[in-house]
Image (cartoon, rainbow, N blue to C red):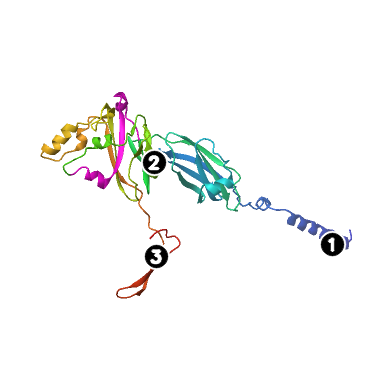
Amino acid sequence: MKLSNYHTILMAGLVLALGGLNGCKTPEEEQEKPTPDVTEPSVEVSFVSSDSKSAAFTVKTSDILEIAYAAFAGTPEAEQTEDVLFMNGTTMECTDGDNSITVSGLEPKTDYTLYIAATTTEDRYYGEIVTADFTTTDYEDDVTLVETDYNGFSVHVKVPGSVKENGNVLRFSYGNLVMYNSNKSGWMVSSDASMLEANGGLYMVNDSTVTFNEENEVYIDEYGEEVVLHDPIVPGEPIVFFVGEFGWGESMYGWGEGWYTAQFDEAGYQDAIWNGTGEVNEEDFWTGWFHKMQFTAREPEVLNATVNVDCSDVQAVTGTIKFTPDPDVYQY
């Protein structure tokens, strides 16, 4: 072999060797670069607890910006789509992880379905309505204040088994605290039993929710007569609600027979008041079931608005005062 050919072959070998080295990678180098984790938006709801008026849930979300929810007993009139829920439901912003929600204003011992819609962090609908079925519990107490409003209230009363076994009923009434206390003073002390007998004939034989407000302060009795049950209720008014057991018998007011016989020792109570020497606890004289509770109507809220009063045009004996209310002010 000639020397020039030898050099040519040697150079070709080196080129092939170097090319081979450059074409080979270690196993670590052969691995692809890791792909960033991509999570899909998700919504999961878990029932936590319920009582007679509300229910609590945990909503676990990922990449969700906002949810809208509503609960219905039975099938809702309108299909609960994402548009409908975000228009009429309760909305809240979410963070990744557990979010707590509470649905209130429910009825006791009722089956409900919770509907949840969501928007993703990309500001698009989640694409699925998430649901959860649940049931509210019964009222726990014999008498439960269900709701107070500016001009009324609702109370739920569970008729005790002893009243039903006795074949009796519960008469109920309420009074403004000031007027109620005025009936407990002076020379004509009125017992709760006597006030219940004059309650307009209202009584119950089964568990009931009773409401006093402007819509039902007047009703027509069995004789077609208009009966005024109570005066208008004002915001923040202190109220006494009371309910007691009555049997069938003659009315002390001369109204004939009816559910007029209070399971109450009226004579013993009056004797203790006039002839006793110590404080008298009226409830000790009830021989049947009785309950009384005190609360206030919903109190007025402070309005974030003003009324401007201009007294610049006022003299010693005359003048003009100008009142300029904000648009949110209804009366002043």
Circle 2: residue type: Asn
Q: Which residues are magenta?
A: 157-185
Q: Is residue 321 above or below residue 253?
A: below
Q: Which is more toward the observer, 262 or 209?
A: 262
Q: Is residue 181 visible?
A: yes
Q: Is residue 263 magenta?
A: no
Judging by the rendered image, the residue that carries numbered circle 3 is 307
Q: Secondary structure at mark 3?
A: strand
Residue 7 marker: 1
Q: Quadrant location of the N terminus?
A: bottom right
Nearer-N-terminus badge (3/2):
2
In the image, what residue occupies the spot 79% across and 56% down? 16
Q: Are marks 2 and 1 in contact (CB under 8 Å)?
A: no
Circle 1: residue type: His
Q: Is residue 210 visible?
A: no
| x and y, in percent, of residue 231 in the image | 33, 45
